[in-house]
Image: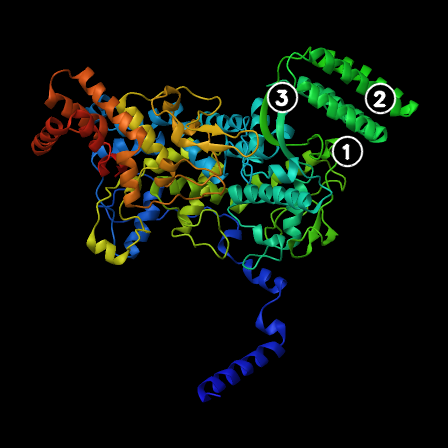
Amino acid sequence: MNSTVGKTTLLLFAAFAVFAFAPIGKLRPTFAQSAASNREHWAWQPIKRPAIPKILNPKSKIQNPIDAFIVAKLTQSGLQMSPEADRRTLIRRLYFDLVGLPPSPERVQQFLKDRNPLAYEKLVEELLASPRYGERWARHWLDVVHYGDTHGYDKDKPRPNAWPYRDYVIRALNEDKPYARFVEEQIAGDVLYPGTRDGIQALGFLAAGPWDFIGHAELPETKIDGKIARHLDRDDMVANTIGTFTSVTVHCAQCHNHKFDPISQEDYYSLQSVFSALDRADKKYFPNDAAMTERFNRLDGRQREIAERKRIIERDAAKAAGDTLTKLDAQIAAAAKQPDNAAEVTGLRKKRASLVDAAMKPELRAERDAINVELGELAIELATFPKPEVVFAATVHYGVGDFRGTGWNGGKPRPIHVLARGQVTSPGREVTPGTLSMLTFQPARFSIPKDASESQRRAALAGWITDPNNPLTWRSIVNRVWQYHFGAGLVTTPNDFGRNGAKPSHPELLDWLATEFRDNGGSLKKLHKLIVMSETYRQASASNPAAEKVDTSNSLLWRQNRRKLEAEAVRDAVLAVTGKLDLTMGGAGWQDFVIERPEHSPHYEYGLADPEDPITWRRSIYRFIVRSQTQPWMTALDCADPSMRVDKRNESLSPLQALALLNNGFMIVQARHFAERLERERPNNLMAQIERASWLAFGRTTSAAEQKQFATFARQYGLPNLCRVLLNLNEFTFAD
C-alpha cells in the first residue's frame, strides 16, 4: 500500500470514529435549541416605528422621511446622493414604473415645459389614477403567485376559467383596495365577504399554481399516486400563501423540522390542515348575490350526488349482465360507425337499457327510477337560474368519477397527519389547524372548535396574516413594492426573510415603511407615491467610480439603478410606439399560439400564430400563459417561469436577446407598422419622420449627427428597417 494513501485512510477512519461515537447533541443542536436561538432573528421581532434620523447637512435634499434614512446611512459610509435626474428621464422612469408604457411625445413635451413645482407630483397622481397602473402592477403580483392559464404537469391542459382571478387583481389594485382586505379576499373572501364578486374571484389565488390533472382527475384519492397528488396540492397552497404574504419558506418542513428557521413539521402540517377540505375546480357563482349562489350550489351538489349514485347502480347492473352486455356494446359501437344507421343504433340502445334493467335488483331499479324523477325536477329548477359566472379556484368540490372532493361528505376537512419524512404512506399524529409557532402575537393553533369547517379555518388564517402585530406581513409587502421601484429590495431575498435569506440593508427604513403602510390604511397607491416622491427615487442613474469603490452593488442607494425593461414592458412599448396597442381591458386571455392535439396532451405551437392578428395586440398582462411551453421570444427576454413562484426576474444580457429583438416575426411586423405610422403622420418628409420616430421611441429630439446617420440608413435600407433598428437600441429597452 502506498504510504500516503494509507495515512489518508487512517486519518479518515479516525475522523469518522470521532464523529460516529460523539454525542449527537454536541454536534448539532436539537430543534428546540435551534428554535430558541433563532427567535432572536430580525424578521420574527415585533415592528417598532423608528425615529426619523435628523439630517444636519444643509446640502442634503430631503423630500420625505425615506430620504432621511437613506442619507443617514450614506453619510456613515462617506457617500452622498447623486443629483436629480433630468425631467425627460424622470417622466420615462415614472411611466414605465407605474403603468408599464412609454409616455407619448406630447405628454413628455408638456412635462418638460411645465415649471410648476407641483408638476412632478401631479404626474405621479395622474399615473396612479390610470387603469394602466393596475395592469402594470398585477403582472408583478402574478409572478409571485405563479399564475398560469394551464394546469402544468404532464398533460398541461388549458385552464379556461383562470382569468377572472387575474382581472380581480387588476381591479383590486386600481381601486386601491386596503391591503388587509386584499389578503383576506384571496384566502377567505367567500367567508369574510360573502356574496361579493371579489370574494369569490379572489379565491383563484389558492388555485393559481400548477395542478396535476392525472393525479386528480384520473386517479382516486385511495391510491398512492392520488394521495401524493393531493398532498402536493395542499403543499402548493401552503407555500403560496405563507411565501406570498409573509416571505417565509415552509417547504422543507414537510419532511423534517426546518433546518434554518424555527418551523416544525407540526407547524407545517397544521397549515395543511387549514386547506384540507379544498380542491381546485371551476367554481360557479352569481356576483353580489350570496343567497342565489348558495341555493344554486346546493341544488347543483344534490344533482351531482344522485347522478353519481345512479351511475354506480347502472355500473353494477352492467357487470351483472355479463358477456351478453359486452357483446351488445360491441354491436352498438360497430353499428354507430355505419352511415345512415341511426334507427338501428337507437333500437340497440333500447335493447341495452332493457338488459341492464333486467339485471337490476327490484329495490335498486326503484331507487334508480326515483333518482330519474328527482333529476328531472332538479333540471327544471336549475334551468330557472341565469347562467352563473365561473372561476377556477380553491373550493369544496364534488367531482365526478375518480376526482371526488370533500363535497360528498358535506365539505368535512380531511384529517391531516404529520408525515414521517413527508411520506403519505407514513402518517403520524393528527394535527389541528394553525400556523407558525415562532411568532407569539397570537396562539400558533387556532382557537376554533376541533370540528371547525374549512371556512372557519381559512378565516382564522386570514386573521393571523393580517393581524397588525404580525411583523412578517407588513415588512413583506413594503419590501416587494420597494424592490420593483429600485430593482432590489431592502431585503434582497423577498421570498425568504428567514435565516437563510439576506439581512435588510436599511432595517430602520424597512420598519418605518411597514408601520407607515400598516397604520395608514394599507394603501398601496399611497406607498407608491411616498416612494417615487422621494429624492432617493429621483436620483440620476449615472455611475460614480469613487462611490462604486465603497458600495459596488449600490445597496446604500447613492444612485438610482438603471433598469432593463421586462419582456411584457418591451412588447407593450413596441405596440404603443407603432400605434397598434389595443387597450381593451379584461376577459379571457388572448393566444399567440395554435393548439395541436388538444384531446390528450396539448401542444402549444407559437410558430404557427399570425403576428398580424390584431387580437394579439392587447397588453401582455392579458396573454394566455402556458406553463410547459413558454413563449420563446418572451422567455429570451427573461419572462417569468409560470411554474415557479418568481419573486425577482432575471435581468440577463445575451446575444440571443439581441437576435430575438431583431429577427422575431412580431418585431419585424411592428417595425413595418411603425414606418407606416411615420409616413401617415409626417408624409413625404424623411427628416420629419426621423424626428417623430425619436420622440415616439425615446421621448427626445435627435441630434444633427443622429439625423444624418439615420437618414443615410433609411435611404439605403428603407424606413421599416430604420424603425427596426430604433426598436432594438438600448435606449428603447432600458429605463434610466
Q: Number of callouts in the render?
A: 3
Q: Secondary structure at mark 2?
A: helix
The kind of residue on which mark 2 rests is Leu
The kind of residue on which mark 3 rests is Tyr
Q: Earlier in the sequence, mark 3 or mark 2?
A: 3
Q: Secondary structure at mark 3?
A: strand
CB atoms of marks 2 and 1 within 8 Å: no
Disc 2 residue crowd, few under 14, some 14–19, many 20+, Cα 10 Å: some
- Mark in front: 3 vs 2: 2
In the rendered image, residue 510, in percent from the top left (x then y), is placed at: 42, 46
Q: Is residue 363 above or below residue 481?
A: above
Q: Earlier in the sequence, mark 2 or mark 1?
A: 2
| Residue position for label 1 | 409
| Residue ID at (63%, 50%) | 268
In the drawing, does residue 534 fall left or right of residue 246?
A: left
| Residue position for label 2 | 355
Q: Earlier in the sequence, mark 1 or mark 3?
A: 3
Disc 3 residue crowd, few under 14, some 14–19, many 20+, Cα 10 Å: many
Q: Nearer the viewer, residue 504 or 277?
A: 277
Q: Nearer the viewer, residue 485 or 397?
A: 397
The kind of residue on which mark 1 rests is Asn
Q: Nearer the viewer, residue 621 or 24?
A: 621
In the drawing, does residue 114 fall left or right of residue 429?
A: left
Rendered image quadrant of residue 711? top left
Quote the CA–CA distance across marks 2 and 1: 33 Å
| Residue position for label 3 | 285
| Residue ID at (24%, 50%) | 80
Q: Is residue 358 above or below residue 418?
A: above
Quote the CA–CA distance across marks 3 and 2: 41 Å
In the rendered image, residue 719, in percent from the top left (x then y), is placed at: 17, 25
